[in-house]
Image (spheres, helix red, strand yellow):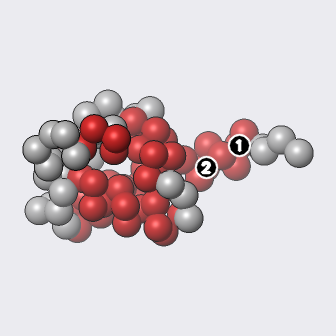
Amino acid sequence: MPRDAAILQRRNIFILQRFRYHCKRNPKWRTDAILEMVAEEFFLSIVTVTKIIRQDDQTVPDPRTISRQKAQVCDATAA
């Protein structure tokens, strides 16, 4: 059974809102820690949450490359 596009869109918007909320609430946290927290809240993988957030904000790093880069701090001013 295919998923309803409107429900997926609402879920994606809520995931983006939660990501921005955690960025503002915890400005010193690394981006990967916030992505992990949001993924746990929605019972999704970090990769899925990152793809959803990157549709709106291209500055969010890909979790597969975070370990190769210096850990980034979430930019609460961008939200």
Question: Measured along the vertical axis of the image, is residue 20 above or below residue 47?
Answer: below
Front position in the image: 16 or 50: 50
Tell me: 45 left or right of 3: left
Question: Residue 76 at x, y = what percent?
Answer: 18, 52
Q: Residue 10, labelled with which disc?
A: 2
**Helix, strand or loop under label 1:** helix
Say which quarter of the image contains residue 6.
top right
> Residue at the location (70% across, 49% down)?
7
The amino acid at mark 1 is: Ala
The amino acid at mark 2 is: Arg
Placement of the N terminus among the 4 image quadrants: top right
Residue labelled with disc 1: 6
Q: Residue 67, labelled with which disc?
A: none
Question: Measured along the vertical axis of the image, is residue 24 above or below residue 74?
Answer: below
Residue 39 in sight here: yes
Residue 21 in sight here: no
Tell me: 66 left or right of 41: left
Question: Residue 52 at x, y = what percent?
Answer: 48, 41
> Residue at the location (78% across, 44% down)?
3
Question: Measured along the vertical axis of the image, is residue 36 above or below residue 53?
Answer: below
> Residue at the location (11% across, 62% down)?
28
- Residue sticking out furthest to the front: 68
Q: Are marks 1 and 2 in contact (CB under 8 Å)?
A: yes
